[in-house]
Amino acid sequence: MFFYLSKRIAIPNNVKLKCISWNKDQGFIACGGEDGLLKVLKLETQTDDAKLRGLAAPNNLSMNQNLEGHSGCVQVVTWNEQYQKLTTSDQNGLIIVWMFYKGSWYEEMINNRNKSVVRSMSWTADGQKICIVYEDGAVIVGSVDGNRIWGKDLKGVQLWHVAWSTDGKVLLFGMANGEIHIYDSQGNFIMKMKLNCLVSVTGAVSIAGIHWYHGTEGYLEPDCPCLAVCFDNGRCQIMRHENDQNPVLIDTNMCVVSIQWNHTGSVLALAGSQRVGGAQEKDLNIVQFYTPFGESLGTLKVSGKQISALSWEGGGLKIALAVDHFIYFANIRPDYKWGYCSNTVVYAYTRPDRPEYCVIFWDTKNNEKYIKYVKSLISITTCGDFCILATKADENHPQFVLVLCNSIGTPLDPKYIDIVPLFVAMTKTHVIAASKEAFYIWQYRVAKKLTALEINQMTRSRKEGRERIYHVDDTPSGSVDGVLDYSKAIQGTRDPICAITASDKTLIVGRESGTIQRYSLPNVGLIQKYSLNCRANQLSLNCNSSRLAIVDNSGVLTFFDLDARVTDSTGQQVVGELLKLERKDVWDMKWARDNPDLFAMMEKTRMYVFRNLDPEEPIQTSGYICNFEDLEIKSVLLDEILKNPEHPNKDYIMNFEIRSLRDSRALIEKVGIEDASQFVEDNPHPRLWRLLAEAALQKLDLDAAEQAFVRCKDYQGIKFAKRLGRLQSEAMQQAEVMAYFGRFEEAERMYLDMDRRDLAIGLRLKLGDWFRVLQLLKTGSGDADDSLLEQAHNAIGDYFADRQKWFSAVQYYVQGQNQERLAECYYMLEDYEGLENLAGSLPENHKLLPEIAQMFVRVGMCEQAVTAFLKCNQPKAAVDTCVHLNQWNKAVELAKNHSMKEIGSLLARYAAHLLEKNKILDAIELYRKANYFYDAAKLMFKIADEEAKKRTKPLRVKKLYVLSALLTEQYHEQMKNAQRGQVKGKSSEATSALAGLLQEEVLSTASRFTDNAWRGAEAYHFFILAQRQLYEGYVDTALKTDRKQYVWFTEKPEV
């Protein structure tokens, strides 16, 4: 993280400021001071240049309004962002609520107790309630509409600070004596806060600030510290909640006057002063920055006599400081978790609705993004086509994971390690992760780059060969492989690691003392130690590993030549030389990937390009450098992307050409190929030779173009230039050049002007532009090639089908006579009539018929499926379809017609399945549909018997016996027909398998219900009739009727 002062605004009449507050949503800045001073300012970016965005754009005051109403010194200003209100208070206890109306601020409410001064005010996170504390112990909680909710007088205390919890259920009151009391939202005392940071402190202390981050932008990790309490003596504690017994403790060694979290709760800023020793001791205004875990991010020095307050801008990219009668603005360059690999920007951010980091892989070329959620993300490191996500494995176990991912976020290989990966570097073959004491090296491999031999060797190799760990104090020779011994990482060191970097052949480790250790790769051997006078924060090697760039904690960039041999002050020859170039306020730099003398760096809001340590003119931008290659710099405006991270805009990716590329282009345009060739000769680079070759091609200077292609080693270009030379027509050459440069419309027009429609069609064929191919084929004067026309129709049909525009695809497939794809489209459109017509138009035994039949089966259209199966001579599949769709009568018919015997077993199996599930009526219906009347009658008779035993309604039992008898009659009729057929002289071979089964049933039947099928129905009929006669008084008739059913019922007592 880097920060620097960027702007200063003076307050008229030298009125000293006491407080300042920046509205996080609307961007208004309120500042209060002596003599009733209250101003509302607003900084707005005013630029028409798309490249000048964010911090690089000029900021001008779009509002500068004096608010009149206070007479005393304004001491407290606080915003309600949700309802766009400003609340202010002065030394006389006067409170004014201001509202925004038609571009200006006006008084809305005024309140004055006339007893004491207001010391602090705080709104809840939702803006519904405000708590006001007075110095005499009075507390008032009011609503946003001005109504008082409750009030309380705390006897015997002086109040100085107040803060709401995230959910608005807890209030913290800071006392003048340094105590913090915890109350609930109704003003009931709960307990005193334990202040661990003051355990060893003696003497009086006062609270400098209490700030509770409300999680509006999510948290860095679950249960992250978010409540900061700081005292004027510089002691600070950061708590997870108000009862945290193990807070993060910080001793800032400064006199603190104000504290505040940034908008994401990731950085805590503390403003105050520090006593500087020397000949004349004096207080220096400073702002210190810390993470929620107490790690120092740096110190910003501010001029002036006394700093009184600070406030963060809503996006966390600026901070406003009230110093004497000035407002100072400092720009913040955050250490985003991001990287760039294979045209993909990878960046991470927190969300309030999820505990994990949201990591987005944004493919800038295709403008596609892939989202991954990662718990406890530590860093993102990229190289080539891959990236490493360093994470914590589990909250309860001190283990960490290095996850190798490709450019769309797919995890390829995770490695669990037992050291904290504070610093991570990556090359094309190695990943290096370092804690403060040791560094771990993993030689990763990706499957697509391995040959079969390498895979075989890799499976046989020991794990220690690919993973090694070294203590920073060790001196490995590189002659033997290291081992994976994590006990080395436990050993301490007096000189911890502070930065690392690596190339394919060199590893550089920087230590806090300024020592730089150089190791060889892949065999890790300590080659050299260098001594510098700074503590490195960022290290970077050039493309040939000859020079090292160092950015220290103060943003000073220096360079070290690793291989230079110089004589030191004692006359001894030493290796390594600190180069004379030094730049300040640097927060990002990148070496060119193809030139060891080229690098780009970000200095405040300017980008400088250096060649051999000589700078070019700066470019105004605030982007982070992604890549420097081919004399072109690609940078990304991460500040703008992270304002709306879910919808990145391609406008936030910017490309800058360096001066030599711009000059070469200008020379080619103005003075010609020969003079430009001399300039490129003096400043050789493949990109410049390619530029020269392209210019020569445009002018059809084929010899110069071929020579330039040779210099930039472009074999395809050389072949193209030679092929152009063999063309006789200059117009043809021009057309080919236009196609080479991607100006296809011009090339096509030139082909058509030459009456070479075939070449125009060939060009469009290469491009896959089938719409234009079809258009050219139809507009031609001669007959079009039928096969090519059919191919074009099918290709356009594929285009629409790929986009699920099935209706449009059908029209082209019909013209292209593509029956396979037509069937698919009809099926997707649910146009089963069209599918049936297609099946009808196909010849018998066509290979597409089974597939169409299966489509009908999937939607339950039995008849159409059977027709298709029979047309392709698959009766077995047709019968299976009938069985699958429960069309048993159709199945039996098909089995008869095609002499298939297995239908009986299928029917029996399905009936057994239904009976097993007690679906007897379904089994009866199955047998009836399949003309198995005997089995159906038997089951129906069984149901009637069971119902009779239950003594249920006699009429229902009668009906069941009637149904059983009817089925029996159908069975008898079936038997007569079968026997009649035999009498007519039909041979036994002509009878079906089913008729044979029925014949066996006739011969073996001895069941009572087949001979007397109607006895049960008659009995219940007479039983019901007798009952009716009895109840109507015809006793004699009832007795006679009852005698008729006697025979049946004598076998069935209790009925």
Image: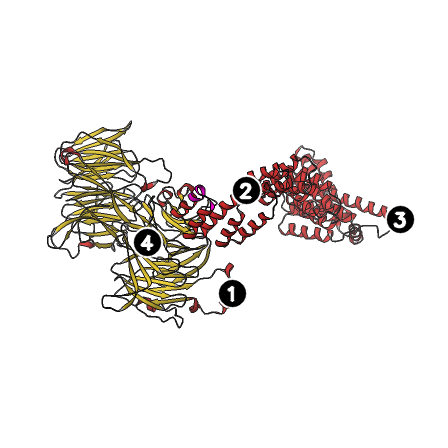
What kind of residue is marked 2?
A: Met
What kind of residue is marked 1?
A: Ile
Query: Residue 1053 at what x, y percent from top left?
Result: 67, 48
In this view of the protein, which residue sits in the foreground, 391 or 718?
A: 718
What kind of residue is marked 4?
A: Leu
Q: Which residue is mark 4?
A: 613
Report, in whole angstroms, how far the alpha carbon at label 4 lies from the one at label 1.
45 Å
Report, in whole angstroms, how far the alpha carbon at label 2 lies from the one at label 3.
88 Å
Give the magenta range.
666-673
* Quadrant holding the C terminus: top right
Res 524 → quadrant: bottom left
What residue lies at 20% left-to-right and 30% top-to-bottom? 67
* In this picture, residue 12 sits left or right of residue 634: left
* In this picture, residue 392 sits left or right of residue 799: left
Q: Which residue is mark 1?
A: 455
Q: Secondary structure at mark 3?
A: loop
Report, in whole angstroms, how far the alpha carbon at label 4 lies from the one at label 2.
40 Å
Label 2 neighbourhood size at 10 Å, few (<14), some (14-19), many (20+)? some
Q: Secondary structure at mark 1?
A: helix
Q: Which mark is residue 985?
A: 3
Q: Which residue is mark 2?
A: 738
Q: Secondary structure at mark 4?
A: loop
Query: Residue 602 at what x, y percent from top left?
Result: 32, 48
Report, in whole angstroms, how far the alpha carbon at label 4 lies from the one at label 3.
113 Å
Instruction: Choose mark 4 or mark 1, whichever is in front.
Output: 4
Q: Secondary structure at mark 2?
A: helix
The reply to whether residue 530 is in sight is yes
Label 3 neighbourhood size at 10 Å, few (<14), some (14-19), many (20+)? few
Of the numbered discs 1 and 3, the one sitting upstream in the chain is 1
